[in-house]
């Protein structure tokens, strides 16, 4: 798991919003996102699904068990 930016870190971590656009379907490959202190949320890689979340949230991609996981990732500053 990792974070794309940290609140209050100024120019060191300027990313504010992380965005993932799923392009292909696969088995596994869910995006797991934690909100501070809450249970993680798993988001299935459904094609044409756009997910946006605060860049400081801890997140990871779960292992792909079948197929290929293609996605576009970007950030808003």
Image (cartoon, rainbow, N blue to C red):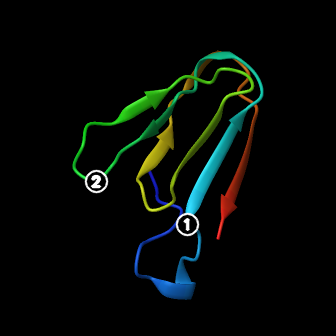
The x and y percentages for residue 65 are 58, 16
Q: Is residue 5 above or below residue 50?
A: below
Q: Position of residue 41 (x, y in %)?
A: 38, 33
Q: Residues within 10 Å of mark 1 (few under 14, many from 20)?
A: some
Residue 10 vertical placement versus 3 (above, below):
below
Q: Write the residue at 42% across / 55% down.
A: 57
Residue that label 2 marks:
36
Measure the C-alpha gap from mark 2 to mark 1: 15 Å
Q: Position of residue 31 (x, y in %)?
A: 52, 34
The residue under label 1 is 16
Q: Give the total number of marks visible in the rendering.
A: 2
The residue at the point 46 percent across, 55 percent down is 2
Please tell me in which quadrant of the rendered image residue 17 appears: bottom right
**Residue that appears at 57% across and 86% down:** 11
- Is the residue 47 above or below the residue 75 in the image? above
Q: Secondary structure at mark 1?
A: loop
Q: Earlier in the sequence, mark 2 or mark 1?
A: 1
């Amino acid at each position: 798991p990792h974070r794309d930016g940290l609140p209050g870190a100024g120019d060191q971590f300027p990313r504010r919003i992380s965005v993932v656009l799923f392009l292909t379907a696969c088995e596994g490959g869910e995006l797991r996102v934690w909100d501070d202190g809450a249970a993680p949320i798993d988001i299935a890689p459904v094609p044409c699904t756009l997910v946006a979340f605060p860049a400081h949230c801890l997140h990871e991609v779960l292992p792909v068990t079948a197929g290929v996981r293609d996605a576009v990732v970007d950030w808003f500053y």
